[in-house]
Amino acid sequence: MTTAQGVILEQPRAIKVGSVPRLGEVYRFSGPLPKQLGAFGNVGIPAPYIVDSQDVTAMRLDSEIHDSTRTSVAPIALKGAPTILYRPSLIMMDFLMAEEAVSANASDRHLVVPRGYYDRAEARAKLEAGIAPEDRTTISLLSEGDLELRQGDDRARFILGAREEEYFERFGHRIITLENLQGSSGQDASVNYLWFGDPQCGSGLDCGGRGLGDAGSAFGVRRVLAGEASVA
C-alpha cells in the first residue's frame, strides 16, 4: 500500500508458528481485531480468519502450541434469556463488523445488533438440538450466568469438539469455567467473541471480554492441500 506521500507501507502478515497434523499450518498475530483479520488474510487464510475453538483443541493435543487465543465462536446475549454460541462469527468474517466491535469495546460496551439476530440463532439452536454437539453451528448455554463445564457436557463438546474427553484428561481439568456474556437489553442483542485461555491456567473461557481493540493474541490456520506449497 502506498500513502499520498509516496511512502510504501508494508501490510501486516501473521507469523507461522508451526504445523499440526490433519489440521494445517498455524499462524499467530497480536493486535486489534481488524489488523488480525488482514494479517491472516495476507498469508492465505480465508474467512473467518481466526481459529475455531475446536481447532484450538487439536493444536493443544497434537502440538506444543498452547497459548491463549481469540476464537471465531461468538456469544450472543439477550437480557433475560440464555446466551447462544454460534460459529463462525460475523465479527471475524466482516471487516466493518470487526471495526464496529472494536469501537464498542473502546467505549466499554459490546457490539449491539437487532433482537432478530438472537431470535434466528435461538431458532437454529433448537433445529440442531438432535445433532452431535461437535457438528452443530449453534448451541444454547442454557444460562445467563457463568458456568462450570464438565466432561461429557454438550456445551463443552460444542466448544472443544469430538476430542473433548481427551482434552479434559490430557490437561487434568475437572471443570472448565466459562464467564458468560451479559445482555444489556431485552430488545437488542449483545454480540462478542469467545476467548480461550491456555490449559496451564485452566483453559478458562470468556465471553465477556472487551479487548478487541487491544494487542490481544489470536491464531489462524491455513489448511494446506496435497501438492500445495507451504507459505513461509
Image (tube, grey):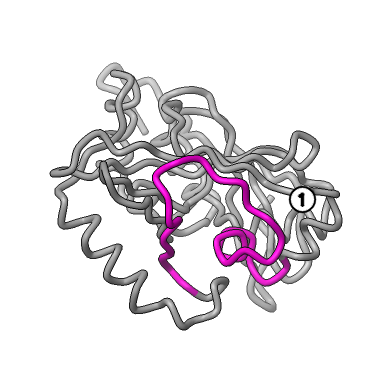
**Which residue is more in the foreground, 152 or 70?**
152
Task: Check the image and report above or below for 84 versus 204.
Answer: below
Residue in the picture at 50% in, 34% down: 12
Residue range highlighted in magenta: 136-163
* Residue 170 shown left or right of residue 10 in the figure: right
**Which residue is more in the foreground, 186 or 164?**
186
- Asked if the magenta segment contains residue 5, the reply would be no
Residue 157 falls in image quadrant? bottom right
Residue under circle 1? 18
Task: Check the image and report above or below for 77 versus 7.
Answer: below
Q: Give the amino acid type for the residue marked by disc 1 in the picture.
A: Gly
Is label 1 in a helix, a strand or a loop? strand
**Which residue is more in the foreground, 199 or 63?**
199
* Residue 152 shown left or right of residue 63 in the figure: left
Task: Check the image and report above or below for 44 versus 213.
Answer: below
* Residue 76 shown left or right of residue 185 in the figure: right
